[in-house]
Image: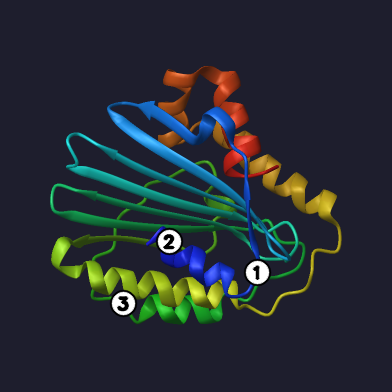
């Protein structure tokens, strides 16, 4: 799915691959992570992380967009395949300078009410997480349905009519506050990487590679 999302980005913004160095392959908790990053011209920073582990029984895909050039919310896509379950998590964080109209994305999400809701729990960043975010736990037989939701929801995001970023420094500061919050207050993947890479390398991974702040 991450490749299809990259194709959707590339249809609107030229993608330029960035050198992520030693961060291109990481190992943690029995999982191997392959990491890539891009500059999407006219959009911002894009990163992709694909992971496999436990003899192929678990697969995880992540795609993050830090829209430094268009005034969109921060976008985070996670997909986890394990034990016959297909978990879809799309989180949008309010790093915009102006109000973002979530109406289209909310309407699309509402069309997939047949996919079971997943309880995301309570987190420190809930105050900036937008209501157009998605949290679903489907079965393997529903994967095509979850794919359709992902693609339609993402298309509404990438084609949204928003202005160019008027003040890049303020926009970056908003994103940096969220990213530093992950590093100091924690998150599922943050804690895993900290144990394996240590705090300094994890900070480099998040700042330079995953979010480009």
- Kindly identify which numbered label has been placed on residue 120: none
Q: Seen in the image, is 185 located left or right of residue 33?
A: right
Query: Residue 187, image x and y in percent?
Result: 46, 36
Residue at x 71% of width, y 75% of height: 162
**Residue 3 position by quadrant:** bottom left
Q: Seen in the image, is 153 located left or right of residue 171?
A: left
Q: Which residue lies under the disc numbered 2?
A: 3
- Secondary structure of the residue carrying tag 2 is helix
Query: Residue 51, image x and y in percent?
Result: 34, 41
- Compare marks 2 and 3 and give the one earlier in the sequence: 2
Query: Residue 76, image x and y in percent?
Result: 50, 54
- Frontmost residue, 172 versus 35: 35
| On screen, residue 185 above or below 212 | above
Q: Which residue lies under the disc numbered 1?
A: 13
- Compare marks 1 and 3 and give the one earlier in the sequence: 1
Quadrant where the N terminus is found in the figure: bottom left
Q: Which residue lies under the disc numbered 3?
A: 112
Residue at x 62% of width, y 77% of height: 160
Tell me whether circle 2 and circle 1 mark residues in contact (CB < 8 Å): no
Q: Nearer the viewer, mark 1 or mark 3?
A: 1
Residue 97 at least partly seen? yes
- Compare marks 2 and 1 and give the one earlier in the sequence: 2
Q: Seen in the image, is 104 located left or right of residue 165?
A: left
How packed mark 1 is, by other alpha carbons closer than 10 Å (few <14, some 14-19, many 20 or more), is some
How packed mark 2 is, by other alpha carbons closer than 10 Å (few <14, some 14-19, many 20 or more), is few
């Amino acid at each position: 799915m991450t490749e299809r999302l990259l194709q959707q980005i590339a249809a609107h913004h030229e993608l330029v691959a960035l050198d992520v160095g030693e961060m291109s392959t990481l190992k943690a908790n029995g999982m191997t992570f392959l990491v890539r990053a891009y500059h999407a011209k006219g959009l911002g920073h894009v990163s992709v992380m694909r992971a496999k582990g436990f003899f192929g029984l678990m697969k995880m895909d992540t795609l993050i967009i830090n829209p430094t050039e268009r005034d969109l919310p921060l976008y985070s896509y996670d997909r986890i395949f394990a034990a016959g379950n297909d978990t879809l998590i799309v989180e949008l964080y309010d790093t915009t300078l102006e109000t973002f109209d979530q109406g289209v994305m909310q309407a699309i999400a509402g069309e997939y009410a047949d996919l079971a809701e997943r309880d995301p729990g309570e987190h420190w960043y809930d105050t900036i997480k937008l209501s157009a975010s998605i949290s679903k736990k489907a079965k393997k037989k529903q994967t095509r349905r979850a794919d359709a939701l992902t693609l339609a929801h993402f298309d509404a995001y990438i084609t949204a009519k928003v202005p160019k970023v008027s003040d890049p420094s303020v926009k970056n500061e908003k994103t940096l506050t969220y990213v530093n919050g992950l590093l100091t207050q924690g998150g599922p993947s943050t804690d895993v990487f900290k144990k394996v890479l240590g705090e300094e390398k994890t900070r480099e991974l998040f700042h330079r590679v995953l979010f480009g702040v």
